Image (tube, grey):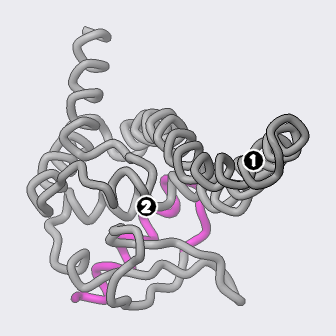
Amino acid sequence: MDQEKLLVTAGTLANRTGYPVPSIINAQASTDGRYVVLEPGATGPVLYVTEDAGEFSDPLLHLVIAQEFVMVGAGLNRHRQMLPVIIGAPLFVLGIVLSLVIGWAWALGIVLVAIPVVWASYEAFWNRRFMRQVDARLAEVLGIEPLAEGLRQLAEARRWRKTFSWLYLGAFPLPPERLTWLNNDQSKTT
């Protein structure tokens, strides 16, 4: 992994997105399959880059780094912190109401089954809406052609499948689907 190339790329893209230039740390892997992860550090933002990302071509590397800057700038970390409250509060109220109506044992069972269903449904809805906003911003930052090329290469970089783990992680839009959105948006403007 060429550290200097990563630093220049991250610095350039940070400036384009209006984000402070982060320090870069090599990482093994992320828990949710991202190639780069941007997190707050003690002295400033830290960009964790996996070994796979360090081997990417320029369009793909620019896409994954700019995407991380745009996602964090659009509130991804704040959303992940608030998600338990967003999901938990209505389910807690539902549990109280159900316990008054049908008894606490049934209410507990229903709420425990509802938690993953509601969580995954909310995440799927939110992820799709959020990624459309991210892609619109990425088109401004990178340009439409480099974004399309990066998405094509990202679609080929990994075997993307809609599995249970994909659903459990929020049914995020896969690169081929995002590329279709981009092409549809492009055809509407021309």
- Would residue 131 be found to the left or right of residue 72 on screen? left
Name the amino acid, label 1. Answer: Ala
Pointer 2 or 1: first along the chain: 2
| Secondary structure category for the residue under label 2 | helix
Q: Quadrant of the N terminus?
A: bottom left
Q: Mark on residue 13?
A: 2
C-alpha span from label 2 to label 1: 50 Å
- Looking at the magenta stretch, what is its main secondary structure? helix
Residue at point 52%, 72% (across, down): 38
- How many numbered markers are drawn? 2
Residue at point 52%, 60% (across, down): 15
- Would residue 91 be found to the left or right of residue 16 on screen? right
Q: Is residue 16 magenta-colored?
A: yes
Which of the 4 image quadrants contains residue 49?
bottom left
Q: In which quarter of the image is the C terminus?
A: top left
What range is drawn magenta here?
A: 1-21
Provide residue 186's location: percent of width, then percent of height: 26, 19
Q: Mark on residue 107?
A: 1
Name the amino acid, label 2. Answer: Leu
- Would residue 28 be found to the left or right of residue 111 on screen? left
Residue at the far left: name it: 156
